[in-house]
Amino acid sequence: MRGVVEGVRRRVQEIRWTGRALARTPWFSAVVVLVAGLGIGANTAIFSALSVLVLRPLPIEAPDEMVDVLAVVPGGNSFTGFSFADWRDLADGAPALTGLAAYTAVRAPLGTDPLAPPVTVQLTSADYFALLGVRAHLGTVRFDPTAGFGADPSAILSHATWERAFGGDPGVVGRSVTLEGRAFTVVGVAPQGFSGHFIGFPVDAWVPLSMIDVFRPGSDPTSRADKPLELIGRRRPEATVAQIQASLTRVAVDLDRRHPETNAGLRVEVTSTTGIDHSLRSGVFGILAVFGAVAALVLLIACANIGGLLLARAVTRRQEIAVRSSLGASRGRLVWDAVREGLLLFGAGSLLAFGLSVWLTGRLERFLAGFRLGVDLPVDLPVLAFTIALGLLTSLVATAAPALYGTGRAPASLLGRGGGGGVGPKRARWAFVVVQVALATSLLVGAGLFTRSVRHGLRADLGLAADDVVVGRLALPGERYDAQSGPAWRDALARQLTGAPTIAAVTWA
């Protein structure tokens, strides 16, 4: 025990000695810490986004068994929906699935205040929560599976909505909540942390699909031409996505043959559930890949720059190293002293990087909001662990070569040259310069191409003059406006707005 305490005390003394040595060159230390902080901080911010969007599992049971069943627009790569009849046929034709749930999302006012911002309401089939393995925080998370269309006006609140709208009242079950001007009975509260199976699209309340006409006036669940539904299923443990794809493709071909007027060219695509909306996956993952590549290049440039600085520092200290070596210090001890300096510098750089990553993740959140992803990128324990691990790795990468070169010559040779250096260190310095130039050139070329692509995208001809166009959304209470009165009211409003001096034209879509 005494030996352990003595060893710890010796290590603390070494750290203090290293800190005093670095304090004698404050500008050198500050530059290394700043460069390391920038490189590690950028990568930490990207890792935070990847942690939320890719690495973190969905808050459901066995998320790797979930699959999205998508309807691909005939002749294209975009997606459409399924009709109620399509859903039933697909569910019956996929024995490799334990269940196939249907859902659709709308924006609707919560409460009776007409000026209150709308909330996200997801209409789901009765088996949605059971299929996902989500259990209720209060009450139940199951709707009546026998209810016909227009029946079962019940609602399940998200945990956040329960706290925000009802103050976390444990007696909320059985109370009434107004959605889209219609009263719904609260039957349950979802568990904390679950706000739907899509990342960035939190659901505020769930209601049964039987009430679809309240939120989509004019919907016809009996028509194959009305296709508002999206589907999610759970595969059996022994089944594969390819098997499910083959089964549902056969169903789609059969529907094309039997119902060509509504299902001509229908193509079904089965993918593993990722939590990212299928229409946004390529864009989100593409931009994260670009940012990740840029951040990696920045980190490599930082390592090369710091390696060059440490090598220059090692060259200026060669006489000191030679004297210590002559007095009996082993090469391993000298290398460890140099590496310890790098660890201290990168430790300070990691602290700076952690603070920088908090700022960068906030900017990244706002950027992803442009993709309609309302994600929260926390700088949590996994992100902190990544920052520490990356700091250790980069410190070893950046300090290993300078430390080995700085201690690689015989003491007598070093003392005889007066610390002037030789061919080996010069080659090392040139190698660092070449690496820095190559990486910096790659980064500049990539940044230039990316900027050019963004500029071309901003200048793309959209086929319309979008500079003076303002877009808004208007939700009419379904219980007061039907398929005839709703459009008539909107047309009357458009005529009134067109007469305003600041409005040139009004249209609906």
Image: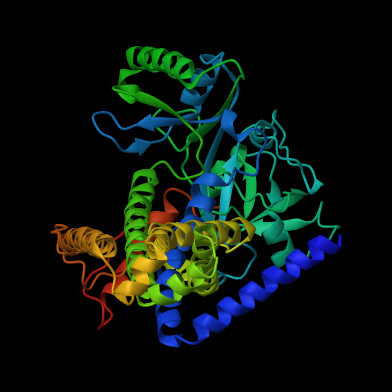
Q: Residue at x 45, y 80 (%)?
A: 29
Across and down, in percent, residue 396 comes to: 47, 58
Picture quadrant where residue 433 is located: bottom left
Q: Front-most of 199 and 177? A: 199
| Residue 294 seen in this snapshot | yes
Vertical order, 88 against 226 (above or below)? above
Horizontal relation, residue 440 to residue 62: left or right = left
Picture quadrant where residue 474 is located: bottom left
Across and down, in percent, residue 87 comes to: 50, 25
Q: Residue at x 57, y 70 (%)?
A: 116
Vertical order, 477 against 313 (above or below)? above
The quarter in which the N terminus is drawn is: bottom right
Picture quadrant where residue 454 is located: bottom left
Number of numbered discs visible in the structure rendering: 0
| Residue 306 seen in this snapshot | no
The quarter in which the C terminus is drawn is: bottom left
Across and down, in percent, residue 123 comes to: 58, 43
Across and down, in percent, residue 62 comes to: 64, 32
Vertical order, 60 against 146 (above or below)? below
**Looking at the image, what colour scheme do you see?**
rainbow
Q: Residue at x 51, y 14 (%)?
A: 93
